[in-house]
């Protein structure tokens, strides 16, 4: 029966590249696994303050859409009613009122 020699017994015969290949492969795999773990850990969910802000923005948009649908005209009376309904909706949902839009001054020549 022929007995196969272990690879370390062939060390004097084999080139250094062949001997280091398993070590390099193990290191590359280890670094790859660690890198993947770090990258995947960084993809966490949004923070609680961020989720709260997004929820408030969506509610504010819904209030603005409802007010615009109820008063679609752009007359002075409709604008006042729309702003009143918008502020009432925002107040009912415990949200801050919108800042009034300022008229930009006319360009000076």
Image (spheres, helix red, strand yellow):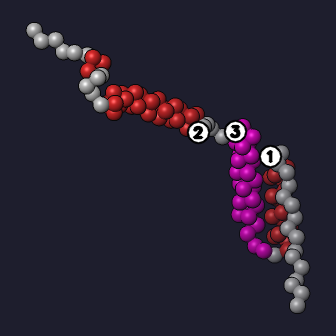
Disc 2 element: loop
Magenta part of the chain = 47-74
Most common secondary structure along the magenta stretch: helix
Residue 17: x and y in percent read: 33, 33
Q: Residues within 10 Å of mark 2 (few under 14, many from 20)?
A: few
Where is mark 1, residue-wise?
A: 93
Residue position marked by numbered label 3 in the rendering: 47
- Where residue 52 sits: x, y (%)? 74, 42
Q: Residue at x 71, y 54 (%)?
A: 62
Q: Nearer the viewer, residue 83 or 11?
A: 11
The C terminus sits in image quarter: bottom right
Residue ID for mark 2: 43
**Of 36 and 54, the residue lying toward us:** 36
Q: Answer with mark 1 or mark 3, whichever residue precedes in sequence.
A: 3
In the rendered view of the protein, which quadrant contains the N terminus? top left
Examine the rendered structure and indicate whether residue 10 appears above or below residue 48: above
Q: Is residue 4 left or right of residue 19?
A: left
Image position of 54 with respect to 19: above or below? below
Farthest residue, direction front: 12
Front-lying residue, 21 or 73: 21
- The answer to whether residue 40 is visible is no
Q: Is residue 25 above or below residue 90?
A: above
Q: Is residue 73 magenta?
A: yes
Question: Could you say where residue 13 lies in the image, as x and y percent from the top left?
Answer: 25, 25
Q: Quick check: 107 left or right of 14?
A: right
The x, y position of residue 64, in whole percent, is 75, 59
Mark 1 surroundings: few (<14), some (14-19) or many (≥20) residues within 10 A: few
């Amino acid at each position: 029966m022929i007995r196969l020699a272990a690879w370390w017994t062939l060390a004097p015969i084999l080139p250094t590249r062949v001997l280091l290949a398993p070590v390099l492969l193990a290191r590359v795999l280890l670094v790859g696994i660690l890198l993947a773990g770090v990258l995947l850990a960084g993809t966490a969910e949004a923070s609680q303050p961020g989720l709260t802000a997004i929820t408030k923005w969506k509610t504010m948009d819904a209030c603005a859409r409802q007010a615009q649908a109820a008063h679609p005209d752009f007359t002075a009376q409709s604008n006042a009613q729309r702003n009143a309904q918008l502020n009432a909706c925002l107040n009912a949902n415990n949200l801050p009122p919108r800042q009034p839009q300022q008229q930009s001054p006319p360009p000076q020549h």
